[in-house]
Amino acid sequence: MNRMTPKLLDAVRHEAVENRIAPSLERRRLRAYMLMLLADGALLNLSFALAAMLWEGRWWEPRAMLAAQAMLPVFFTIALYNGSYGVRALSDWVFAARQALIALVISAALLNFVAFYTKSNDDFSRAAVTLGLLFTALMLVALRRVVAMLIVQRWDGRVSNRMVIDDGGASFPFEGAEVINAADYHLDPASHDPFMLDRLGKLLRNQDKVVVSCPRERREGWALLLKSAGVYGEIVSEPAHSLGAVGVHRYDELDRTTLVVSTGPLGLRARILKRVFDIVVATAGLIALSPVLIAAAVMIKLEDGGPVLFVQRRLGRGNLFFDVFKFRSMRLEKLDADGDRSTARDDDRITRIGAFMRRTSIDELPQLLNVLKGDMSIVGPRPHAIGSQANNKYFWEVDRMYWQRHSLKPGLTGLAQVRGHRGATEVEKDLTDRLQSDLEYIAGWSLRRDIGIVLRTVMVLKHDNAY
């Protein structure tokens, strides 16, 4: 069996991949959603104030504004769930206007229903409320049209990144999508090469939709790669159970059908919640543990005068490489950059202060900086060195599902760790137990579960397998 050669791409091909990385449009979209949401709130209040002025002869008349304030939270709740603030709403102003009007009508109906049963109808001016609803509807539609014009003018009409990977399948002329040839970048779905996966991860970075067109025999491999990359992915194909398709999408204008094989593990709201949790916990952790961090750094420096931090390349989200930070616990002359040799009990490479730090997990604390950088999360599958092995096999040779654990950011701690699956991987079961826990965590993520894992981690900081 050919072993993975830890060699980076040649400079020309590496530069070509870097040049094809798409710009992130998610922040741009988030800003647009927030501006639309704020504008909708302002327009609703303005419409009801104007209606009160025309009907009651009084600007910001209390009864009319009471109706506006009561309706606003209901309108926002419905609009947030019916797609009024979504990607399609930015690219299709007719759809955006229709969804906003639906949210307005439902919120008005609910307000009237509640007012009827609480016998508070007399608190509202029916004429002013009706005029306010009419003005709001007109302004909501006008705003969507203006937003569409601004997107065309300032963003060239581009609100999402789409990519088609041609791997020898049927043509797929997807309008507005970037098309790459798999052979040009040596992309092979049957390969286990981490460097190829890192290359693919760079190409898929910031993509909102990826469509792969390939021969039948390569579809299963591409399905696994798309799931592992944590992107929304489709494969041009007729339905096939072996791919684990989660949906079928028909493009009538192209006369093509695709299988949706991956949607990414977390939605937008979940990603925001998880990121906020990461920033809060990492910042608080760095502040609270600063005496421990300083003391550890001083002890390492005093022991042999070498560098305090050990930086090692590991596999992260989307199978991309990133540099993980740890306190150096090994002797300078015996550092293991690729993690080819698992740490053993009474390992001769470990320094005295290093042994203590590893037993108490203090050596992992600098990874709080990785969390703030965005390379890692507080909770997630632990990142592994590319040379890690179990029973003399690379981890992906033990179980190919290993790559799928990289659909989520790696974590400082994880479900596998609080279950006691940590330390050296001497036999294959050491890996498969961790993999099972990692995939279970990804499939059932929740903020409550993250909080629970963090609390349970405190109980396993010192562990018999930590050495």
Image (cartoon, helix red, strand yellow):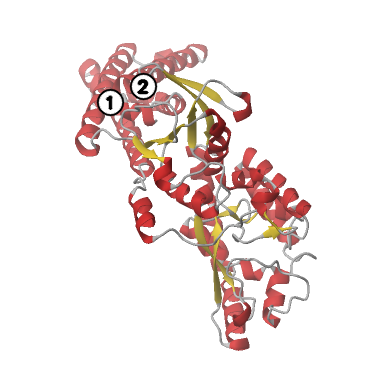
Label 2 with label 1: CB-CB less than 8 Å: yes
Tell whether 291 sits left or right of 151.
right
Quadrant occupied by the C terminus: bottom right
The answer to which image quadrant residue 443 occupies is top right
Secondary element type, mark 2: helix
Residue 245 in sight from this viewpoint: yes
- Look at mark 2 in the image and give the residue it sits on: 100
- Look at mark 1 in the image and give the residue it sits on: 144
Image point (58%, 33%), residue name: 220
Instruction: Name above or below for residue 168 compared with residue 458.
Output: above
Q: Residue furthest front?
A: 1
Amino acid, disc 2: Ala
Separation of residues labelled 2 and 1 (CA atoms): 9 Å
Q: Position of residue 73 (x, y in %)?
A: 43, 29
- Along the viewing direction, whichever of 399 and 271 lies nearer the viewer: 399
Amino acid, disc 1: Arg
Image point (44%, 17%), residue name: 111
- Along the viewing direction, whichever of 443 and 168 lies nearer the viewer: 168
Secondary element type, mark 1: helix
Tell whether 336 sits left or right of 120.
right
Tell whether 354 sits left or right of 464.
left
